[in-house]
Image (cartoon, rainbow, N blue to C red):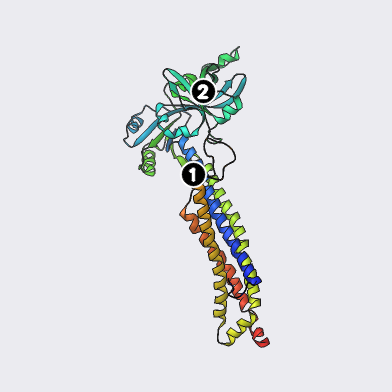
């Protein structure tokens, strides 16, 4: 890699090849770590709004939670929160602007999740204040209707079809209409941002459902084995209800994140392959430059395997050295970004300001093994070229 006497063009080419591996390895570490950071933020926000276990009925929309099993489950000492949910689509109107959205009535245990405040963009996550009910609206609804959470004189009107009225001369008689003020605006992702969260008492009055609910949302204390809990509930009531963990509640989100991660990795690996295969060019030039030296070594008794080993080691040395330095630089960059956040998103948000970083030891191993595998192939090809036409070289010498 280095010349003791003077710098040759081969040394420069080898250095460029090493630089390509270095930059590619550093880029892989940095981008994978940033993607890990975004994934962690997204799943954290998603987890803030979704329970660890969700129970829904298989038949129909609603069910009665006042059963011996659910009452016993409510008393489970490992439970952190036991939230009754009544959810339905409704027409939401603010001023003269209408919009179809989802009304989600929740019981008091829903607010035990202290991480809800991190999702709030404006106002606060307040559902009750004294005897007065409030709603917290998703960012999509707030943006579409222009809801002002600080205007107490302009409540949100919510329309829901009456179950007992089929047709009427006055269309408004076919709907239950309730008004409620907004206390805050939350933003998570598109799936949740068209929801209006209200106290379950408000939703029961609006939907005329005094007892039944659409789902039970369970969150457990830290250290609880959720897979054991889920299987235990399934064994007890699995035929009548669906019991889903967080991953099962939104399989598309987890699949999308996984596909994006591997797509990014494959694209960067392709760039890295191009950089590493430049080594073949530099080693080929080195073979041409050292043809006489190869012939002399062969005449002194060096076999083809030894000569191949020299050039194979040269290629691996360029690749591995570039990889190690690249990983070190990528790690240093990630630590600085993680500590100081000097590269900003370019837009003020309540969730993240700078690009997030989440370092995983598996990423370092994956990058090193990827570079190593590609380097073995590239160095092997170069090593084979070193003995090609060796007999002709010896004759010319």
In this view, the residue in front, 237 or 119, is 119
Check disc 1 and report the residue beneath it: 40
Q: Secondary structure at mark 2?
A: strand
Of mark 2 and mark 1, the one earlier in the sequence is: 1
Where 300 falls versus 361 (above or below)?
Answer: below
Check disc 2 and report the residue beneath it: 182
Asked whether the viewer can see residue 39, the reply is yes
In this view, the residue in front, 311 or 127, is 311
Q: Position of residue 386 (x, y in %)?
A: 61, 77
Q: Secondary structure at mark 1?
A: helix
Quadrant of the image for the N terminus? bottom right
Asked whether the viewer can see residue 280, the reply is no
In this view, the residue in front, 165 or 79, is 79
Q: At x 48% / y 58%, what residue is drawn?
A: 365
In this view, the residue in front, 93 or 359, is 359
Where 237 falls versus 158 (above or below)?
Answer: below
Q: Position of residue 169 (x, y in %)?
A: 61, 11
Outermost residue on the front side: it is 5
Count neighbours of disc 1 (C-alpha within 10 A) and say few if under 14, some if 14 to 19, many if 20 or more.
Answer: some
Where 252 falls versus 317 (above or below)?
Answer: above
Q: Position of residue 122 (x, y in %)?
A: 52, 28
């Amino acid at each position: 890699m280095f010349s003791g006497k003077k710098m040759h063009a081969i040394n420069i080419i080898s250095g460029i090849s090493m630089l390509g591996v270095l930059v590619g390895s550093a880029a892989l570490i940095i981008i994978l770590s940033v993607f890990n950071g975004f994934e962690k933020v997204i799943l954290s926000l998603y987890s803030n709004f979704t329970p660890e276990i969700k129970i829904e009925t298989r038949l129909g929309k609603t069910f009665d939670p006042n059963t011996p099993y659910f009452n016993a489950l409510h008393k489970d000492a490992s439970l952190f929160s036991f939230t009754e949910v009544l959810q339905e689509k409704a027409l939401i109107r603010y001023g003269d602007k209408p919009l179809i959205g989802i009304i989600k009535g929740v019981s008091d245990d829903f607010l035990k999740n202290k991480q809800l405040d991190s999702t709030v963009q404006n106002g606060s996550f307040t559902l009750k204040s004294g005897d007065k009910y409030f709603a917290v609206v998703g960012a999509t609804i707030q943006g579409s209707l222009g809801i002002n959470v600080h205007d107490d004189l302009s409540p949100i009107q919510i329309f829901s079809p009456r179950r007992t009225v089929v047709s009427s001369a006055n269309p408004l008689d076919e709907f239950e209409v309730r008004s409620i003020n907004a206390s805050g605006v939350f933003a998570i992702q598109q799936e949740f941002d068209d929801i209006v969260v209200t106290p379950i008492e408000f939703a029961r009055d609006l939907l005329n459902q005094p007892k039944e609910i659409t789902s039970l949302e369970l969150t457990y204390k830290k250290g609880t084995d959720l897979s054991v809990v889920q299987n235990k509930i399934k064994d007890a009531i699995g035929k009548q209800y669906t019991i889903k963990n967080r991953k099962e509640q939104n399989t598309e989100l987890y699949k999308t994140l996984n596909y994006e991660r591997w797509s990014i990795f494959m694209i960067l690996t392709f760039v890295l392959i191009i950089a590493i295969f430049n080594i073949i060019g530099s080693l080929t030039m080195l073979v041409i430059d050292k043809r006489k030296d190869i012939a002399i070594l062969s005449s002194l008794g060096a076999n083809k395997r030894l000569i191949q080993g020299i050039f194979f080691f040269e290629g691996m040395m360029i690749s591995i050295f570039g990889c190690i330095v690249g990983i070190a630089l990528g790690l240093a960059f990630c630590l600085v970004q993680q500590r100081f956040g000097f590269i900003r998103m370019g837009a003020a948000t309540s969730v993240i300001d700078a690009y997030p970083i989440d370092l995983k030891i598996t990423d370092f191993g994956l990058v090193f093994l990827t570079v190593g595998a590609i380097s073995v192939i590239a160095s092997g090809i170069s090593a084979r070229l070193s003995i090609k036409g060796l007999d002709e070289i010896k004759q010319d010498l």
